[in-house]
């Protein structure tokens, strides 16, 4: 019954909702709790997918929040998955087609939405213990039923497993390295009543067991950096000031000393400088100058391209140069738009992973992206019933593809190691 109520409400309050909460939403935040639900977690071990991993497409919606020139550029390489209501599908098609978008690379996902911030309400991706790409959903931190349903619609369209974790979140406030590390601003805790905190000052915040356990069980995140948002804006999203560029590099905005948030931004930058990557080494911290609160960190990494929001500002070229220095093997492309300091390109586009991509080679039983004696030990322990292997590990251990794990597979791994 409540789904019908939400649908009626979404039609009544607006056909296009703003980034910030409306007055009606502020008075009805309790509805978010009615949207929450939990499934069992994916089979483990679970690994969250990073933005800079191989992508087969992007998720946008119509009416668009980005230019058709940006859509055209992305459609050169990947599939455009466009959320659109049934009655607007023809308009969406005509809009892209008239802009010379490659329509062979466009797929429509039918269903109503409330806004175009697909980053904020779109799906979070994991690879589960069976090696399957899956969506693990959250409850969107806005009482917007249509937007909140988007991840499930995507899972149905792509025919992939769908799970739901019982916590409140938003995609613009989440970044992960793909190896068990993630970071968010403070609302990751403060918007979940189970955390029992309103701390928006600490860098970092004290842990919240409820959210941290969900991040571990459902997303494979064992190190979760939650810090006060240094921008002191209404949105409190990490993508407004920071971004993981790779598993070893992080980008943090920089402002002049006269800026009101200078001290707090520098404190956050120092904190990330003090943290370690999954390899146990300090992060390479890159800084991009944003003297007038330009949203340069709100970029999209899409395979070998990076789409950077530019503002026709004197500092645009410097921002592009920072990305070129940090990611020399990527093409850096600047795009203008209706960008704001709290809402730009990254907020309006969400990557869809290449679900056929397998990051591990045959023989990498322990999933550390290296084939060595440790993988041999794991097979031996498995053969002597000392450990269990999940389905993904069994597939990687069966080097000769004979549907059996035995000494022949050990010999093949030894040969791989000796040939390197």
Image (spheres, rainbow, N blue to C red):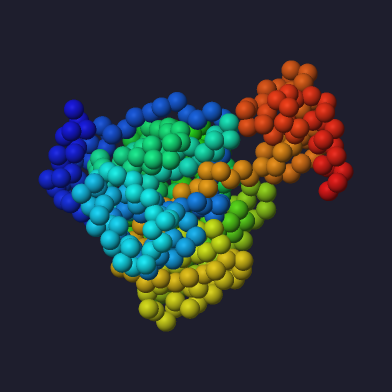
Where is residue 309, by image quadrant?
Answer: bottom left
Task: From the viewer's side, name the closer residue of 201 and 398.
Answer: 398
Q: Residue 68, image x and y in percent?
A: 34, 66
Task: From the viewer's side, name the closer residue of 1 and 141.
Answer: 1
Q: Is residue 172 visible?
A: no
Q: Residue at x 16, y 51 (%)?
A: 14
Q: Residue at x 78, y 35 (%)?
A: 374
Above or below: residue 207 compared with residue 22: above
Q: Residue furthest bottom?
A: 314
Q: Residue furthest left?
A: 12
Q: On the rendered image, what quadrant is the N terminus found in?
A: top left
Task: From the viewer's side, name the closer residue of 195 and 89.
Answer: 89
Q: Residue at x 12, y 45 (%)?
A: 12
Q: Residue 278, image x and y in percent?
A: 64, 47
Position of 128 with respect to 258 (left or right) is right
Task: From the viewer's side, name the closer residue of 273 and 170.
Answer: 170
Q: Residue 295, image x and y in percent?
A: 40, 66
Position of 257 with respect to 245 (left or right) is left
Total label count?
0
Above or below: residue 69 compared with residue 118: below
Above or below: residue 258 compared with residue 167: below
Q: Residue at x 50, y 51 (%)?
A: 56
Q: Is residue 363 visible?
A: yes
Q: Residue 304, image x and y in percent?
A: 56, 62
């Amino acid at each position: 019954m409540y789904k019908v109520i939400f649908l009626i409400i979404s039609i009544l309050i607006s056909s296009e909702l703003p980034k910030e909460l409306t007055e009606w939403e502020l008075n009805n935040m309790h509805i978010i709790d009615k949207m929450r639900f939990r499934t069992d977690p994916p089979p483990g071990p679970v690994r969250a997918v990073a933005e800079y991993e191989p992508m087969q497409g992007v998720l946008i919606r119509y009416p668009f929040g980005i230019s058709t020139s940006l859509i055209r550029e992305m459609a050169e390489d990947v599939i455009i998955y466009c959320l659109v209501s049934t009655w607007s599908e023809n308009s969406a098609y005509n809009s892209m087609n008239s802009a010379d978008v490659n329509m062979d690379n466009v797929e429509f996902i039918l269903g109503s939405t409330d806004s175009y911030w697909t980053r904020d309400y779109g799906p979070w991706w994991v690879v589960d213990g069976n090696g399957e790409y899956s969506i693990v959903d959250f409850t969107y931190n806005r009482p917007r039923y249509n937007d909140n349903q988007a991840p499930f619609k995507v899972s149905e369209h792509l025919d992939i497993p769908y799970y739901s974790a019982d916590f409140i979140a938003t995609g613009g406030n989440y970044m992960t390295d793909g190896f068990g590390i993630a970071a968010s601003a403070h609302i990751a805790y403060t918007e979940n009543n189970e955390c029992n905190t309103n701390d928006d000052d600490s860098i970092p915040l004290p842990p919240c067991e409820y959210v941290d356990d969900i991040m571990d069980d459902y997303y494979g995140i064992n190190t979760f950096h939650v810090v006060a948002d240094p921008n002191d804006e209404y949105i409190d999203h990490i993508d407004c000031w920071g971004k993981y560029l790779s598993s070893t590099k992080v980008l943090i905005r920089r402002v002049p000393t006269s800026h009101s948030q200078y001290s707090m931004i520098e404190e956050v930058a120092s904190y990330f400088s003090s943290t370690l990557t999954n390899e146990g080494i300090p992060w390479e911290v890159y800084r991009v100058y944003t003297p007038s609160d330009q949203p340069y960190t709100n970029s999209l990494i899409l395979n070998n391209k990076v789409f950077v929001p530019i503002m026709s500002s004197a500092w645009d070229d410097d921002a592009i140069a920072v990305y070129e220095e940090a990611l020399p093997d990527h093409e850096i492309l600047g795009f203008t738009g209706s960008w704001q300091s709290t809402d730009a390109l990254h907020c309006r586009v969400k990557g869809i992973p290449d679900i056929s991509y397998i990051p591990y080679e045959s023989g990498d039983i322990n999933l550390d992206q290296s084939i060595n004696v440790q993988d041999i030990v794991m097979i031996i322990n498995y053969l002597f019933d000392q450990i269990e292997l999940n389905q993904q590990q069994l597939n990687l251990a069966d080097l000769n593809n004979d549907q059996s794990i035995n000494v022949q597979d050990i010999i093949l791994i030894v040969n791989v190691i000796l040939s390197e």
